[in-house]
Image (spheres, rainbow, N blue to C red):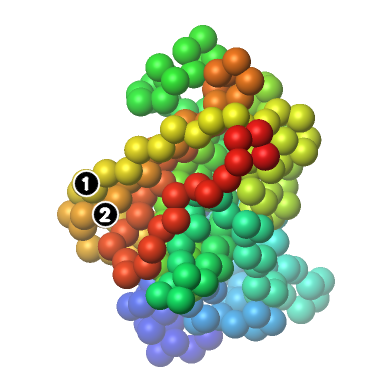
Amino acid sequence: MTRRSEAQFLERYRPVEFPGLPKYAQLRETLLAAIEDGYWQPGSRVPNEAALASMTPYSLGTVQKAMHDLVQSGVVIRRRGEGTFVAKRRMAMNAPLHLHFENESEEPLAVFPRIVAREKPKAEVPWSEFFAGETEDLLRVDRVFLVGKLFYVFSSIYLNGARFPLFAERVASELEPCNFKDVIRREYNVRVQRIQQCLRTEKLPASVCDVLKVPKNSKGCKLELRALGAGGRPVYYQDAFIPPNPFKLRLADWTPGS
């Protein structure tokens, strides 16, 4: 990569701080943005780790961790003796339930999810009351959704990691195109019987604005979902942050127990 192209890359994809994400994850998101925008096309070669370290304000170790994540998630592939290349486009999500956006003709927009974090949640509100005595084993899975290749949605889903361990164990790229509700039903025979939904307009958190690539202090929608199974036992809790957009969001057309 020439110095001119390095400058163009930094001007367009200068890394932004995302509170709560370590430096390597911030760089990973920057590189993903370049790939999703087409700066690096599928099949094209990505600069090597030393070159990326010289192009960005990160150490070689940080770059190596970021690239390792991209390899593990299947976004890029390594070819021995040749370098690192952008993989084929990731798959669209199969029948999204909660993020079902439609255009003017009521045709659904394809949704391309990406898992950006999986960890034990640190705070205990507002989902702690919903899970009652099951908070000790909770897992939070953060995802970024590219909707119709037009805008992003950020979502955090909370579930019991001991009850549903594959969400922590399975490779991210295998989970990304899946509807989590269907995975829970198929793998654990747990059916959602009821979904409580709450939608409100509010100022989006600054960290979420960075992820959604919208200006700070932007207003958007926050969709809160509480999924309950047999006997009212919690299955999952989900927050989704949606930026302003011209599309219709269809709220969960589904049959209880399906």
Q: Is residue 49 left or right of residue 106?
A: right
Residue 221 lies left or right of residue 156; in this view the side is left
Label 2 amino acid? Answer: Gly
Q: Is residue 248 above or below residue 65?
A: below
The kind of secondary structure element at disc 1 is strand
Q: Which residue is mark 2?
A: 220
Q: Residues within 10 Å of mark 2 (few under 14, many from 20)?
A: some
First along the sequence among labels 2 and 1:
1
Amino acid bearing label 1: Glu
**Residue 232 visible:** yes
Number of numbered labels in the structure image: 2
Q: Residue at x 40, y 89 (%)?
A: 4
Is label 2 in contact with label 1 (beta carbons under 8 Å)? yes
**Percent coordinates x, y for residue 50 in the rendering:** 57, 69
Which residue position holds label 1?
202
Q: Percent x, y for residue 255? A: 60, 41
